[in-house]
Image (cartoon, helix red, strand yellow):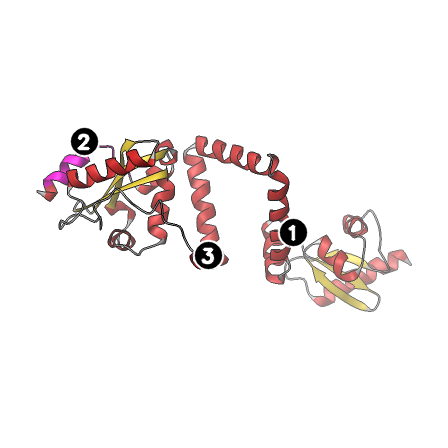
Amino acid sequence: MAIETIEKLLEDHNFLSFKEIRSSQIGREKGNVYLCIIRNKFIYVGVTQNNLTQRILEHKRHPKTKFSRLLAECNDAEINWAIVEKHTSRDELSKAEKSWIVKVGAFGTEHGLNETSGGTGTSEYTHSQESNAANSQRKKEYFTDPKNRKKLSLANAEAHNLNPQIALEHSLHMKQKFNGVEGKIAREKVAIGMQNYLKETDNLESHSWDRGARPFVVVSKDGIQGFFLSLNECSRKLDMNSSHISSVLSGRRKSHKGNVFIYIKLGMTTYEILKIAEEKFAEID
C-alpha cells in the first residue's frame, strides 16, 4: 500500500530535487504544505510559513529527527520535494498538515517519517537565551571554516545564475537593508564586523589577496622596513601617508619619508629587492 501511495503521489504532483527547488521561483514562495519522498519508499509531510528552500536547509543543518537523519544519509538524487498546498495563516497550514499526514500515512507507519500527527509544530515555542546563544555559536563556528563560506557563496551564485529573479530580489533586499530606515545601523554593524575581522593578520592577507592586492616592500637606506598587502596597513604600521605611498608605487613620486616602495614579483629574492632599492636611491641622490 505504501509503494502504491507514493507512486500515485509522484504521478499527481510536481516533485523536484533540492537543486531545482533552490533555483526556481517555487523555492522562494512562502506559506507551504510540502511532501518529501526519499528513495521512493519513505514520506514526510511538513509545513513552513517561510519559503521551502530555507526550510530544506534547516532540515539539513539540524539532523535531530528521524526524517532529518535520513536526509543526511541520502544524496540529492534520492530525495524529491513537492508543494501540495499554499496558505497564508498558520492555522490553515496546521489543518492542512494534519490532513495530509493522515492522507499519505506519514505518521505511525513503516513508510512514514513524521513523528507526530501534525498541527502543532514549533511555531509557538520560545527559545531560551541559552538556546539562542548556542544556536548563534554553532552558526559562527560553521562559517568560521572558509570551506563552508565558499559552499554558501557558490550555492548563492548558482541560484542567481539559474534564476535571475532570485538575483533581483536579493539586490532589492540589500538596497532596502542598507539604504532604508535602519540603513545606517546596518552599515555600521557591517563596518565594525569587518574591522574586527581584519584585525587578524591571516584574515587581512586573505581579504586583500581575494580583492587583487599587489604585495609591496618598504625599503630605507637602512634596509627593508616591512612587507605589506595594503596601503592602509603600511600607513598605520609605519605612520605614513597612504596617498603618498600610492604615488611612489605608481611612479608619481620618488620616495616618502626617506623610503622607496617596490612591488614584489613572484620569486623575487631579497638581493633583487635591495638592488632595485639601491637604483631608486641613486636616482633620488
| Residue ranking furthest to the left | 1
- Residue drawn where x is 24% and y is 44% of the image: 118
User: Image quadrant for the C terminus?
Assistant: bottom right
Q: Quadrant of residue 56?
A: top left
Please, what is the three-letter code of the amino acid marked with disc 2? Asp
Amino acid, disc 3: Gln
24 on left or right of 195? left
* Within-10-Å neighbours for mark 2: few <14, some 14–19, many 20+: few
Please tell me whether residue 264 belongs to the stretch shown in magenta. no
The residue identified by callout 3 is 129
Disc 1 marks a residue whose amino acid type is Ala
Q: CA distance from mark 3 to mark 2?
A: 44 Å
Residue at point 82%, 63% (across, down):
278
Q: Are marks 1 and 3 in contact (CB under 8 Å)?
A: no
| Residue 30 rendering spot, x and y as whole percentages | 37, 34
Q: What residue is shown with label 2? A: 12
Q: Mark 1 and mark 3: span between their CA atoms?
A: 42 Å
Give residue 79's position: percent from left, percent from top.
25, 45
In this figure, which residue is indicated by the disc labeled 1? Answer: 213
Q: Position of residue 97 (x, y in %)?
A: 24, 39
Q: Which residues are magenta?
A: 4-16
Task: Compare residues 157 and 67 and report the one nearer the observer.
Answer: 67
Mark 3 or 2, closer to the camera: 3
Q: Is residue 92 placed above or below 224 in the rendered structure? A: above
Residue at the image point whose x is 63% and y is 51% from the top: 192
Task: For residue 51, say whether it is visible.
Answer: no
